[in-house]
Structure formats: structure tokens, C-alpha cells
Image: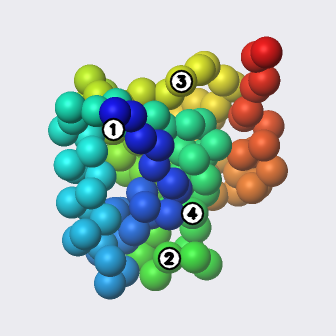
Amino acid sequence: MSVSVDANVLVYASNEADPVYEPALELVERLAAGPGLVYLFWPVLVEYLRIVTHAAILPRPLSARDAVGNVDSLLAQPTCGHPASSTASGTSFERRGPTVPAATTSATCTWSP
């Protein structure tokens, strides 16, 4: 079985102030442990990075380095991955931080018929 995770689940699992932090973190950890595959689409990851680093959205936003580290940790799991490459990159996000616009989410999608 394979699953895809919404950006909100990743945000909840990173925001200790959220009432659903613990169940969200447990879910992400359980899914990442396998045995099923977890697809992490670039638009979801970019949206996660944009939200968790934005001071107007979270009471205690993560640094860009910590947020990218969370994504890298997930992608390092043998059961987690992205189904296609794109132009999104953590290095670019670390330079720009939360100024990455929501429209970037659309720009990172590529269509391959």
C-alpha cells in the first residue's frame, strides 16, 4: 500500500503548540517506518516549508535550516520519496526562506504525459 501526506499533517507534526501535534507526529513516524511507500510530492513539501517558517502563521516558526532538515530526514527514509524530480530544492529555500510565494507550489509541478 502507498500513501501521500498532505502539507497540513506535516505542519501539525512540526508545531508543538498545535493540539494535534502528538497524533500527527505519531502518524508521520508510523508511515515513515513502513512497510508501505509514502509519496511526498514537491508541492506539499514546498507548502510545508513555506508555512512552518512563517512567523505570521505559526507562533514559533522553524528556521529554514530546521524545516529543510525535517524534509531531508523524511526523504532519507527508505519508504519515503518523491515520485518525480522538479525544480524545488532545499538549498534554494534556505536562501529565500518564507518569502517563497504560494505560487511556487504550482511552479514546481511538472506534467509528464
Q: Counting residues from the N terminus, which is met first, the one under dot 3 or under dot 1? A: 1
Q: Nearer the viewer, mark 4 or mark 1?
A: 1
Tell me if label 4 and label 1 are in contact, CB under 8 Å.
Answer: no
Q: Quadrant of the N terminus?
A: top left
List the residue tagged with mark 1: 74
Asked whether 19 or 39 is in front, the reply is 39
Tell me if label 3 and label 1 are in contact, CB under 8 Å.
Answer: no
Q: CA distance from mark 4 to mark 2?
A: 8 Å
Q: Quadrant of the C terminus?
A: top right
Which amino acid type is shown beneath numbered disc 2?
A: Leu
Q: Residue at x 79, y 37 (%)?
A: 107
Q: Counting residues from the N terminus, which is met first, the one under dot 4 or under dot 2? A: 4
Q: CA distance from mark 3 to mark 2?
A: 29 Å
Asked whether 96 or 67 is in front, the reply is 67
List the residue tagged with mark 4: 51
Q: CA distance from mark 3 to mark 4?
A: 22 Å
Which amino acid type is shown beneath numbered disc 3?
A: Pro
Q: CA distance from mark 3 to mark 1?
A: 14 Å
Disc number for residue 58: 2
Which amino acid type is shown beneath numbered disc 4?
A: Ile
Name the colouring of the figure: rainbow
* Residue 105, image x, y percentages: 72, 46
Q: Nearer the viewer, mark 2 or mark 1?
A: 1
* Residue 14, image x, y percentages: 35, 63
* Residue 58, image x, y percentages: 50, 76
Q: Element at badge 3?
A: loop
Q: How dense is the environment of label 3, judged by Cα within 10 Å: few (below 14), some, or many (20 and up)?
A: few
Disc number for residue 83: 3
